[in-house]
Image (cartoon, rainbow, N blue to C red):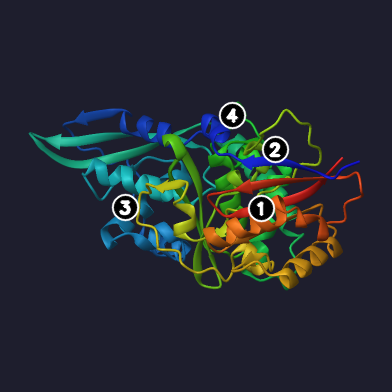
Amino acid sequence: MKKRLAILFWMSTFILAVCIFFEVRQIESETGTNIIHTEENNAANQIQEQEILSLQKEQEGLYTYECLSEEERELYIEIYNSLVVMQEQELSTTDTEQMEKVFQCVLNDHPEIFYVEGYTFTKYSRGNKINKIVFQASYTMESAEIEQKKQAIETCAEEILSGIPTDADDYEKIKYIYEYIIQNTEYNVHAENNQNICSVFLDKQSVCQGYAKATQYLLLKAGIKSTLVVGYVDYGEGHAWNLVYADGEPYYVDTTWGDASYRMTTEQSYEVNNLPVINYDYLCVTTEQLCKTHTIQNVVPMPECTAIADNYYVREGAYFTEVNEEQLTELFEKSYAEGKEYITLQCAEDNVYQEMYEELITKQKIFQYMNATSDGVIAYAQNDEQFSLSFWLSE
């Protein structure tokens, strides 16, 4: 039989229709209870100086916390403490917009706070002057259930992280966590708790925010600096992903968009088997790469990510600045030696990508590199925005 190529395209439209973003919770927060009192209330929790120092120490290295002013950091500690001890808290600000911003900062830094869905606040005033605000979070579960889930999540996380080699570097840790979550999580818009880490670790199904928070939770435990990033993707749909640091350099990671089964569609009514499970186009990418499909609208400014040393394709020897037959041979031989079922590569520029497509697809030179039988079918996926191609054998 004649050798055949099956064509697939990486698409972003499907995931956009089902991805949920935390914006709903922001709206709940902004429209939460706002009660004005004219008498002082001393029942609000007061944090002792020693506790403040301890809490400040805990936040060191957290991206969003470090972006805040000294005044905002003080407010951050107050809100964080309130969420952890589950008590109302008198705040050091009377600015509700600042309170909302810092509340989001706390949640972006702390994926382990999975039991908060918003807050209410009480204004205390005399005449037209607001004297103080007392903050109170809104919780999705009682203390006993929170502790039970915390322990279950901790046990699950320890088991997952035990699979990371002791000599793994930052990139290898990030890649391991990226792959694990994708391989062990089903994308389901109807999943319970899909806006927090419970959905991933306990239920094994989630949406973008659950993916991103679970990724962040494991990264932080593995010693990798990370935070939640929110914004929009193509067609204006809300989305969440991560900022990570590898070898001191910032990169973006989008675990949800790495789940390739939700971003692929066939051009033909043609059954293709053994689809790749993982798309690596969003594993440790630059701001330029990310912003081809994502729009950042985060609560604090994000750094300009320009490094590529720990980008997936660069680290795996699959980044091409030209169509190089020797490099292609090494890539395919290495992939087969590692037992990979599919091979993916990325080109540095559009002209290289077009030339690579011409050589491998149009001229069908891919058959020189893949171990296909005479009647076998080689399937491939292409991402014209990220200049990447993936190949695998289809039965």
Numbered disc in front, either 1 or 2: 1
Q: Nearer the viewer, residue 331 or 38?
A: 331
Q: CA distance from mark 4 to mark 1?
A: 28 Å
At mark 3, the secondary structure is: helix
Numbered disc in front, either 4 or 3: 4
One can see residue 194 in this view = no
Query: Which numbered tag is attached to residue 75?
Result: 3
Q: Nearer the viewer, residue 124 or 34?
A: 34
At mark 2, the secondary structure is: loop
Tell me the kind of residue under disc 4: Val
Numbered disc in front, either 2 or 4: 4
Q: CA distance from mark 3 to mark 2?
A: 35 Å
User: Residue 119: x and y, percent?
Assistant: 38, 35
Specify whether 346 is left or right of 376: left
Tell me the kind of residue under disc 1: Leu
One can see residue 56 in this view = yes
16 shown above or below 183: above
Q: Residue at x 92, y 48 (%)?
A: 374
Q: Earlier in the sequence, mark 2 or mark 4?
A: 4
Where is mark 2, residue-wise?
204
Q: CA distance from mark 2 to mark 4?
A: 12 Å
Q: Residue at x 82, y 60 (%)?
A: 368
Tell me the kind of residue under disc 2: Lys
Where is mark 4, residue-wise?
189
Q: Earlier in the sequence, mark 3 or mark 2?
A: 3
Q: Residue at x 79, y 63 (%)?
A: 332
User: Residue 142: x and y, percent?
Assistant: 55, 32
